[in-house]
Image: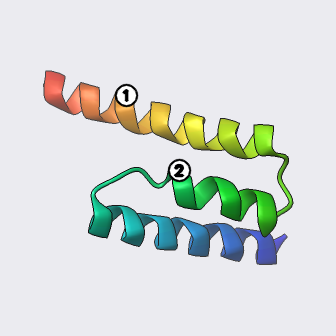
């Protein structure tokens, strides 16, 4: 369980770094890593990525609204 959390944190750090450098979406990094390293099904990996995108979009929209 602790190993899985550490791997998820490392995936997040890697994705954040690549996204910050390329100014693009981290989906191309997150989905394959979740599927290959953690054994998620493709549907679960894509769904997880979409959920993160929705949460980030809501946060950005709220901040622009303020």
For the C terminus, give its image quadrant: top left
Rendered residue at 68%/59% (across/down): 32
Q: Which mark is residue 40?
A: none
Most extreme residue toward the top is 65
Q: In which quarter of the image is residue 62?
A: top left
Mark 1 — residue? 58
Mark 2 — residue? 27
User: How far apart are the two marked residues, 2 and 1, measured between alpha carbons?
Assistant: 17 Å
Rendered residue at 33%/34% (across/down): 59
Q: Nearer the viewer, residue 62 or 20?
A: 20
SS under mark 1: helix
> At which x and y percent is residue 4?
78, 70
Q: How many marks?
A: 2
Asked whether the beta carbons under mark 2 and mark 1 sit within 8 Å of each other, the answer is no
Give the left or right position of residue 53, taking residue 62 as reference. right
2 or 1: tag closer to the N-terminus: 2
Give the left or right position of residue 21, taking residue 32 as reference. left
Rendered residue at 85%/70% (across/down): 1
Q: Nearer the viewer, residue 35 or 10?
A: 35
> At which x and y percent is residue 42?
78, 44
Above or below, comparing residue 51 to residue 12 in the picture: above
Rendered residue at 79%/65% (across/down): 36
Numbered disc in front, either 2 or 1: 2
Give the left or right position of residue 55, taking residue 32 as reference. left
Above or below, comparing residue 1 to residue 47 in the picture: below
Crowding at label 2, few (<14), some or many (≥20) Cα neighbours within 10 Å? Answer: some
């Amino acid at each position: 369980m602790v190993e899985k959390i550490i791997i998820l944190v490392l995936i997040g750090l890697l994705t954040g770094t690549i996204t910050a450098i390329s100014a693009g979406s981290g989906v191309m990094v997150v989905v394959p890593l979740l599927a290959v390293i953690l054994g998620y099904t493709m549907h679960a990996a894509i769904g997880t990525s979409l959920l993160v995108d929705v949460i980030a979009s809501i946060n950005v929209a709220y901040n622009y609204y303020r």
